[in-house]
Image (tube, helix red, strand yellow):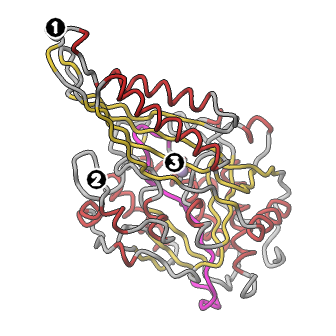
Amino acid sequence: MTQRALPASIPVDSGRICAELQELAAFTGGEPPGVTRVVFTHADRDARQWLAAKCREAGLETREDGVGNFFARWVGSDARLPAVGTGSHTDAIPNSGIYDGTVGVLGGLEAIRALRESGFVPKRSIELLMFTSEEPTRFGIGCLGSRLLSGRACIESVDRLRDGDGGSARDAARAAGFDGDLESVRIAPDHYGHFVELHIEQGPLLEREGIPIGIVTAIAAPASLRVAFAGEGGHAGTVLMPDRRDALTAAAELALEVERAGRESESPDTVATTGVFRPFPGAVNSIPSRCELEIDVRDTSEGSRDGAVARIVSAARRIADARSVAVEIETVNSDPPAVCDPTVVAAIRGAVAAEGLSAREMVSRAYHDSLFMATLTRTAMIFIPCRGGISHRPEEYASPGDIRAGVAVLARTLAALSSSQAGE
Ligand code: GLV
Ligand code: MN
Ligand code: MN
């Protein structure tokens, strides 16, 4: 694969992409400066329309599938060859920052525009993707769009997904204007030949080491559980302590056990979080009759992750027995780690060298749509630094210079992959 057809300097317009990141941030369901863009809400739908218009303005052919995955294609001179995919997500968890996912979507668009402006003609088509619901906020499961697209989610399990108001994912897709035909979302295995995702690191290493580019070689294995304790509610003044079956205190014990499962794992990479803790009915003078937890466990080693999950599950049962409360445990997802593809990693390395930048190889501890794209096609990721390693908070920040470097590396990587021969 060659860099020869490209100019010494790729005309990435960092002013344009930074202005677009700010424009996109205005589509929020919450109070700025935080961004809240939950899938299929008005903010998400408005952001999608805005993005589609930008892509059409750039001369790309756009389409959407039944769950709202969005595709914008720059048709190559040999459009029969499997395409090169790039992209990420634009949904955002409540009170999030403006760079998570969006740098990969708008960065992909900017890379395509820069390649076009530099006179590059792609052989394989280059396709920009915006995946539906990378964030698990609404339906409890992350990477909904890329799971379905890659065939890693069975339709029946997706059909069972409900949001906090009891609405189904399929109905929510329909209400947002997508036909909800989940069977048609799975894409042919030869649709893509490669996939590469640009993303902020969401961790501190690149900034700490003063390195502008991370080349991701593996993505950690995530799992999540939903646990519900059901006890007996009652009057906070009149039910004496020996008679209580308090669901919240059972859940509190489990939350501490989740933390211990992370801290005491033999693997330094195990992380375990109780991110949702919902007591019912939620009145100060009422004993909680029910308490729901959502728990996130990850490791780069699937075995260590599974060990921590098993410890949490057995603790939930032990606590329920000891406190005479009922417990329901649901494994929402338990995904294997992804190993990135050497061909795509080599193309990124070549792009880094052509840009005269330094890079380090690293593991992604956050999950990404690439976790699922890697099951479908040859995949790797490009990371750029973010200030203080902060993410999933309004303070999230990536500098225009780092964004420019990431987009230039992405553009060169896309160009190299797009020029590759069939089978390469
Ligand atoms: C993605 O947002 C993750 O939680 O890793
Ligand atoms: Mn995120
Ligand atoms: Mn993300």
Q: Does the magenta stretch include residue 368?
A: no
Q: Name the residue under label 2.
A: 162
Q: Name the residue under label 1.
A: 237
Residue 341, position as x, y percentages in the image: 72, 67
Quadrant containing the C terminus is bottom right
Q: Name the residue under label 3.
A: 223
Residue 250, position as x, y percentages in the image: 36, 24
Q: What range of the chain is rendered magenta?
A: 75-97
**C-alpha distance separating marks 3 and 1:** 40 Å
Residue nearest the viewer, comparing 20 with 64: 64
Q: What residue type is labelled 1?
A: Gly
Of the residues tagged 2 and 1, which is closer to the observer? 1
Q: What residue type is labelled 3?
A: Ala
Q: Residue at x 42, y 37 (%)?
A: 95
Q: Is mark 1 on a helix, strand or loop?
A: loop
Please indicate, yes or no, whether residue 201 appears anywhere in the rendered image: no
Of the residues tagged 3 and 2, which is closer to the observer? 3
For the residue carrying disc 3, how many other residues have a C-alpha within 10 Å: few (<14), some (14-19), or many (20+)?
Answer: many
Q: Which of the 4 image quadrants contains residue 74?
A: bottom right
Above or below, comparing residue 63 to residue 47 in the picture: below
Please indicate, yes or no, whether residue 12 appears anywhere in the rendered image: yes
Q: Which residue is drawn at 75% across and 51% down?
A: 213
Q: What residue type is labelled 2?
A: Arg
In the image: residue 75, left or right of residue 185: right
**C-alpha distance separating marks 3 and 2:** 18 Å
Q: Which of the 4 image quadrants contains residue 79?
A: bottom right
